[in-house]
């Protein structure tokens, strides 16, 4: 078939060559397109939200370093290839060009002649916001940050209004959501960097608009409810982990489930106790007065003393903070024991009541169950639907983040290889079909490859009933006229074998 394709393409016939050329060109173009798509570089954002002057400085610096770049967001951002990202950051940092989109205190490097006081305050706020954005963006896991400050203006005749406030929008890498510990750290950083800014006036939000910090002046009951629920859930998870860590060595990993419900008392109680001692007395007040007469005839001076006594008292003040445990309930589900049968198979068997009692005692001690407080615990032995055998990590069990990272890196090469195989298969199929059609179309009218290759007898003459003998296999139709075959004969004169067979058939019929 390959030789037929070569002869067809290299032959003098133009129309017969056109389908092969079209299929070949299409296959080559498809292969090149798939190869380009699979190997093209990935572009990542280097900086965004900058002014045209800042973007121009970045582009100039990248051009000097020989780093390819692309403008994004109508000229407000710059993207580079993923392999050149670290080099581009180093180049911009060495050139003193900010990458956060807003400049920092380098705004004041230029002379400020002719600037008004209002312009100076605006530039100071912009510089402070830019510096905070850079600092937050350097934290581990943070992709970008945007800071908005509402500074308090000082004026002699201005009334004292609300103080300084700040809002920070944080975006983490890989679309993760910031936890509250990170939000608390960012809030503390911003509050400590701005004069007169209280910690409760800093709002931290993620890129979905979810508030991560508690704000003063909001709904007090709603804030306390959210805080109480969070504390309660942390207590429950802590107790659940304690029980699971204790039992996993006994029943096996993945063969138990522990749930703890905690009822907490968040009331703040202050108590003052005053105790009066009946046996003891103490002088509360002593008054002494002396009367001196005006002359000697009235006698000597008199001294009058008055004392006030009260029983001894003691005063004690007690203050109890919230989050006191009122009641605990625990539910423990333990799977069956795995035993080996005589056939060598793993069989699940129920656990003994004595073992279940020991497990219940262990959980009660680990969690802190007190019957006099009304606490309760239930331990049940039931078979698990999933396999209770522990699953150990290894080369083929990466975490979810590793799987996503590998898929993101390898999806293009894999899809490119699949596309290449499909393109080669489609092209090969089309070429084979065209080759068959071209071989059949190259024979003269009324002559087929079957009649030419297998229709002769022992002496080289056409066999009886063959197509070459002038009739179809059924013998119903007469052979075409000799003159018509003579007119079509020059088409196959180039092949001596076909010509000889045609001449023999004509002589036989004559």
Image (spheres, helix red, strand yellow):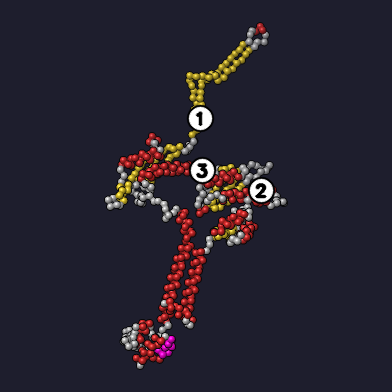
Q: Quadrant of the C terminus?
A: bottom left
Mark 1 neighbour class, 10 Å CA radius: few under 14, some 14 to 19, many 20 or more: few
Q: Position of residue 494 (x, y in %)?
A: 43, 86
Secondary structure under the numbered disc 3 in the rendered image: helix
Position above or below: 30 against 456:
above
Q: Hey, which residue is sitting farthest left in the picture?
A: 342
Q: Is residue 11 magenta?
A: no
Q: Nearer the viewer, mark 3 or mark 2?
A: 2
- Helix, strand or loop for the magenta stretch, by majority: helix
Mark 3 neighbour class, 10 Å CA radius: few under 14, some 14 to 19, many 20 or more: some
* Residue linked to disc 3: 223
Dot 2 or dot 1, earlier in sequence: 2
* Residue 260 in sight from this viewpoint: no
* Residue linked to disc 1: 317
Residue range of the region highlighted in magenta in the rendering: 485-494
Secondary structure under the numbered disc 1 in the rendered image: strand
* Residue linked to disc 2: 121
Dot 1 or dot 3, earlier in sequence: 3
- Relative to 125, 318 lies left or right: left
Q: Hey, which residue is sitting farthest top in the picture?
A: 297
């Amino acid at each position: 078939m390959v030789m037929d394709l070569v002869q067809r393409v290299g032959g003098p016939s133009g129309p017969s060559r056109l389908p092969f050329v079209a299929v070949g060109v299409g296959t080559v173009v498809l292969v090149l397109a798939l190869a380009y798509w699979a190997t093209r570089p990935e572009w990542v954002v280097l900086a965004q939200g900058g002014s045209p002057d800042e973007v121009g400085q970045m582009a100039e610096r990248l051009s000097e370093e020989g780093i390819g770049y692309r403008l994004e967001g109508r000229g407000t951002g710059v993207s580079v290839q993923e392999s050149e990202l670290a080099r581009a950051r180093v180049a911009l940092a060495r050139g003193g060009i900010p990458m956060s989109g807003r400049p920092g205190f380098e705004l004041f490097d230029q002379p400020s002649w002719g600037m008004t006081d209002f312009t100076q305050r605006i530039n100071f706020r912009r510089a402070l916001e830019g510096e905070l954005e850079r600092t937050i963006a350097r934290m581990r896991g943070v992709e970008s940050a945007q800071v908005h400050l509402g500074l308090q203006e000082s004026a002699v005749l201005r009334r004292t209004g609300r103080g300084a406030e700040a809002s920070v929008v944080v975006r983490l890498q890989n679309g993760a959501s910031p936890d509250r510990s990170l939000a608390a750290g960012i809030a503390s950083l911003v509050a400590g960097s701005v004069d007169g800014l209280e910690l409760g006036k800093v709002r931290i939000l993620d890129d979905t608009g979810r508030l991560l910090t508690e704000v003063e002046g909001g709904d007090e009951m709603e804030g306390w409810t959210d805080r109480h629920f969070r504390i309660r859930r942390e207590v429950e998870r802590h107790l659940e982990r304690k029980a699971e860590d204790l039992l996993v060595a006994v029943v096996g990993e993945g063969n138990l489930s522990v749930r703890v419900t905690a009822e907490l008392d968040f009331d703040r109680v202050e108590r003052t106790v005053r105790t009066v001692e009946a046996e003891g007395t103490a002088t509360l007040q002593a008054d002494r007065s002396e009367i001196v007469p005006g002359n000697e005839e009235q006698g000597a001076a008199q001294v009058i003393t008055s004392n006030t006594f009260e029983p001894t008292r003691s005063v004690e003040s007690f203050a109890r903070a919230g989050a006191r445990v009122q009641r605990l309930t625990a539910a423990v589900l333990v799977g069956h024991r795995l035993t080996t049968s005589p056939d060598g198979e793993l069989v699940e068997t129920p656990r003994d009541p004595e073992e279940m009692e020991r497990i219940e005692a262990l959980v009660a001690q680990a969690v802190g169950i007190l019957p006099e407080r009304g606490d309760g615990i239930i331990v049940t032995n039931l078979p698990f639907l999933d396999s209770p055998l522990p699953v150990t990590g290894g080369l083929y069990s990466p975490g979810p983040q590793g799987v996503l990272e590998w898929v993101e890196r390898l999806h293009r090469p894999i899809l490119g290889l699949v596309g290449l195989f499909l393109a080669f298969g489609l092209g090969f199929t089309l070429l084979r079909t065209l080759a068959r059609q071209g071989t059949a179309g190259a024979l003269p009218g009324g002559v087929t490859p079957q009649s030419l290759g297998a229709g002769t007898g022992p002496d080289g003459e056409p066999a009886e009933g063959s197509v070459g003998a002038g009739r179809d296999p059924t013998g119903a139709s007469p052979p075409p006229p000799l003159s018509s075959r003579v007119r079509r004969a020059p088409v196959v004169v180039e092949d001596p074998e076909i010509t000889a067979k045609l001449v023999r058939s004509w002589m036989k019929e004559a």
